[in-house]
Image (tube, helix red, strand yellow):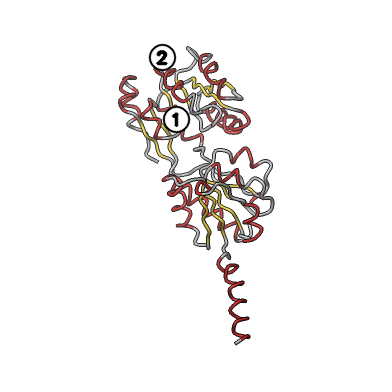
Amino acid sequence: MRRCMFLILALATLLPTLAQAYDILVLQSRRDPAYEEALKGFRTTNSNSQRTIVLSDYAEVDVVRIVREDRPRMILAVGDAALTATRTVQQTPVIALMALGIHKLKASHSNLTGVGMFAPPERYITLFQTMATHRVGVIYNPARSGWYVQYARHMAEKAGIELVTREVSAPRNTLAQLSSLAGKVDALWMLPDVTAVARETVEAYFRFGQEQRIPVISFAGSYLGLGAAAVVEINPTELGRQGGTMAAAILDGSNPSAMPVRYAHGTAYKTNNSVLKKFGSLFGKMKRLPTH
């Protein structure tokens, strides 16, 4: 009897450890349909065992302690809050999805990689060419999206398009920089840069477009309702699939330090016809845009 009780106690001690044995710790910033779509895509290409923690469900989550005790083989961070929660994790590989801050952290975190929220610049260049624009205004924070603007400028120059750029270091600088573009551009490009495009400055872009009678090009379908003429929108499911492929490679032995942050694939053009009709011939041109 005593021996049986000892066995039961031993199993009770062991079972929690067994229950915590998994390959991937999934940190989800909050319950959000786009995040759920990204996770759905991730799981179509990666069937490794997972534990999911939604950070917004808790007052505080000690990610370092969880990693130390559970020892997952890697972390999937979905959203910027989840990415921030992994900043003190040094050894365990981290893949970030749906996070704007990934490029800024990549340089100082060799264990980090993922899929960014930026569409390939070529997708926007095709859009600008279709719209017959020649001088496109861009406001950005060099610390967050300078790398992207530099590459986009190179692509634009090859297509005969000039990017007229303005730098900001805080959202409060955006209004003045918008004003400085008046009369100097024939389109305005909004980047997924949380400094340049903040909650308090979003509407200013569309007011500027209306006042200057130029189209505003953005990166999310939600901006069409605010007055964007067109957007290049990422597909969260496809982005998740990309992340799943990267995770499989890391679990097979690839080093995340050698894996650059990737552009989001599977993007789609979406247009606001009521806005485009105000620009006359532009409406017909935009109908010829490729769907993928």
Q: Which kind of residue does numbered mark 1 sit on? A: Ser
Q: Quadrant of residue 152?
A: top right
From the image, tell me which residue sits under label 1.
218
Taking depth in this image into account, of 256 and 133 the one nearest to the observer is: 256
**Disc marking residue 211:** 2
Q: What amino acid does circle 2 point to?
A: Glu
Return the x and y of residue 43 as percentages of the image width and height: 47, 57
> What residue is rendered at 62% in x and 28% in y?
142
Residue beneath the point at 43% across and 35% down: 220
Nearer to the camera, 285 or 158 = 285
x 52%, y 51%: residue = 243
For residue 178, above or below residue 128? above
50 above or below 129? below
Query: For the N terminus, which image quadrant?
Result: bottom right
Q: Position of residue 151 (x, y in %)?
A: 58, 32
Q: Position of residue 104 (x, y in %)?
A: 62, 37
Kindly state the secondary structure of the residue where label 2 is placed: helix
The answer for how far apart the CA atoms under marks 2 and 1 are is 17 Å
